[in-house]
Structure formats: C-alpha cells, structure tokens
Image: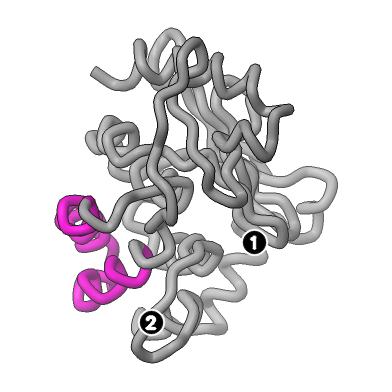
Amino acid sequence: MNKQIALQEINENTFFWKFYFCWSRGYDNEKEINIDEVLEVVEIDETESYEWEWKFFNQNDIEENPRYVAGKINDDLNYAIEFAEYEINFFLNDIYIGNLGGHFEAWFFTMDELLSFEKYPNLFLLFLPMTGIQESERDILKVITVKHLNAIPEFESHSEYISDCILNGLVMQSPFLEINNIGLSNAENHSVRNITDYPHYKKDVTKLNKILKNNLVC
C-alpha cells in the first residue's frame, strides 16, 4: 500500500471525515457530549467504517509505517499530516506544529491564516482542528465551515450542528500577540506558539511566522 494518501482519496469521503473529526476537541456544551458522540448524527454502516479504517490506514503496519497526507502549497511552504497509531501529527516545512491525540498540541492558526487555505477545501478541513479563534470570529468561520461540510455525504443534513460543536473546541482563552522579531504568539495552553511556556519552540515559531506572513496562499 502507498503510504502517502492522495487528497483525492479523502475528498467527500464520509468515512474519513467522520474518523478525522472524532480526533478534534469539539463538543456539544448543552448536551455535555464530546465530538465523537456528536458525530453519531452522521449515519454510516459501522462495520463498513471499521473495515475501511483498517484497510485505509494499513492497521497491520501503522506503528512502523504510518500513512500521511503531504503536499506543496507554494515554493516556500509545504505540509505533512501523519496518521500514527495513537495520534495525528502536523508539520509545516518539516517543522512540527502540533498533534491530535493523547497529548494535544496545536500551532493555533489564526482565522485569517486558515482562510488563506480555503480554496483547497480538504486542506482547510484538515487544518481546522489546528486553529484558534476568538468568540467574535465564530460566526464568520461557521459560514465557511458549514459550506465545506455540506460537500461531504451524510454531513450535509447536520453541518450547522457539527460546525458549532467543532468551533466550540477552537475558541481560545487568550488573544494572539505580535512580538517584535518573532511575530504572532499567544499564551494558550498546549500551543506550539506559546513561547513563554514553551521557549524551545521560539526558533521554529519565528521561522514559520515569517513564512506564513509572506507566503500564505495568495
């Protein structure tokens, strides 16, 4: 099996996106349920889903040879998302920017950074759980998220509800800050951009901030 997952393989793939968003930090605050329970509204054959997941991610060899999505956005920016056995790891220009899994960490893309990927719907949805927003930005991002979820079979009937729950998990407790000679940072827990609590990320944050500022999709 080819280790690299082509974006065409996940395009409008209900099994994939239900699997993927179960790893996100979303939740329904009123019902007090996490995103995996929220996504039960997406009706699929669970046996088929399990068989698809086992084959798609090559579960017999996932520990040694995890599958991944990777590509080049422009001459200065590339990405990779690796589906390891117990976590999903994210990289920009081969620099680690976070993971979904047991020890969650995120780069926390700003909403504007995320929206620069919007003409690549699959990439937009893949980076969505790595994003941090303010409450005031929720309505803007919801409209766009709903639009992309509507393209996924079985999601379209519940896209507004699912979007609300995903966005619940993206709201940050602190704002982004611009720091001289470094660029955007924040004080959020589990943030790779939080160079106060995690100073070892400072060099990489500075480098990626510059690249994102100058080279995000135009």
- Residue type at mark 1 is Lys
Q: Residue at x 49, y 38 (%)?
A: 186
**What amino acid is at disc 2?**
Asn
Q: Which residues are magenta?
A: 137-166
The stretch drawn in magenta includes residue 189:
no
Residue 208 % position (x, y):
51, 20
Report the mark closest to the observer, 2 or 1: 2
Instruction: Please give left or right for residue 100 compared with residue 199 in the image.
Output: left
In three-dimensional space, the C-alpha distance between marks 2 and 1, rounded to whole angstroms, equals: 34 Å
Image spot of residue 211 (x, y percent)? 44, 14
Residue name at image x 55 percent, y 45 percent: 106
Local SS, label 2: loop
Q: Is residue 165 magenta?
A: yes
Which comes before the other along the chain, label 2 or label 1?
2
As drawn, the label of residue 134 is none
Q: Which structural element holds mark 1?
A: helix
Left or right side of 190 for 166: left
Q: Which residue is mark 2?
A: 29
Relative to 20, residue 162 above or below: below
